[in-house]
Amino acid sequence: MIDGRFSRRALVLGGLAWIATGCASGGPTYRLDPRYMRQRVKYPSSEKTGTLVVDTSERFLFAVEDDRWATRYGVAVGEEGLTLKGRATVDRKAEWPSWTPTARMIQRKPRLAQYAGGVPGGENNPLGARALYLYRDGQDTHFRIHGTNEPWSIGHAVSNGCIRLTNDDIVDLYDRTPVGATVVVV
């Protein structure tokens, strides 16, 4: 300190020490496997522009674009036997959605009973920053395409059936996907 002021050197060294302890980021950071990072790819498909195609075996979601291109996102999918298959539509969208486990989720995982009253939207909510609600014939399927506060799950089959993206990716997808969009899960 010089004359009651911090020197530039003290400020830089103190800042580096703070970052090294994990305080700057709130804790350890997670590095996404590069193959699951969002990217524009060639995608020959008969699906029309704006359709979302989820390949559960490869753990990718493709937002179909013009001229045989798509934006590809890495996703986490449902555990074996818990994944929606076939066609649905996005009939509702929400920013920082609330979450309530279904009765079937609680039956499979009794520890979820503590959330039966719901979890308000926010950083600690399992649905993350955004959610696209999937419907069939006007009925809620209870499956969602949503963000996650567990980015390390991307590339794995870990959820109760929903399709998870990083929060950055769901914000991007949310902004480009209108209500009424078709979703195909294979």
Image: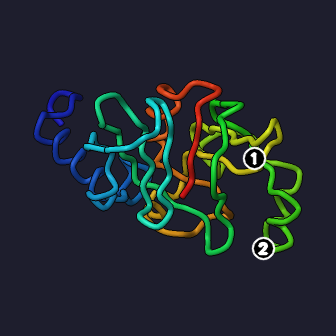
In this rendered view, identify the residue nearer to me: 58 or 109: 58
- Residue that label 1 marks: 99
Q: Residue at x 61, y 71 (%)?
A: 79
In this rendered view, identify the residue nearer to me: 184 or 109: 184
Where 62 sits versus 65, above or below? below
- Residue that label 2 marks: 109
Classify residue 113 by image quadrant: bottom right
In this rendered view, identify the residue nearer to me: 140 or 33: 140
Where 139 sits versus 81, above or below? above
In this rendered view, identify the residue nearer to me: 24 or 127: 127
Which image quadrant: the C terminus? bottom right
Classify residue 2 by image quadrant: top left
Q: Left or right: where does residue 55 sit relative to residue 146?
A: left
Q: Residue at x 30, y 50 (%)?
A: 18
Check disc 1 and report its element: helix, strand or loop. loop
Q: Residue 170: x and y, percent?
A: 50, 39
Which image quadrant: the N terminus? top left
Q: Left or right: where does residue 25 sit relative to residue 119?
A: left
Query: Farthest front residue?
Result: 46
Q: Which kind of residue does numbered mark 1 sit on? A: Trp
Q: Residue 164: x and y, percent?
A: 54, 53
Looking at marks 1 and 2 on the same chain, the residue that comes earlier in the sequence is marked by 1
Query: Farthest left residue?
Result: 9
Q: Which kind of residue does numbered mark 2 sit on? A: Lys
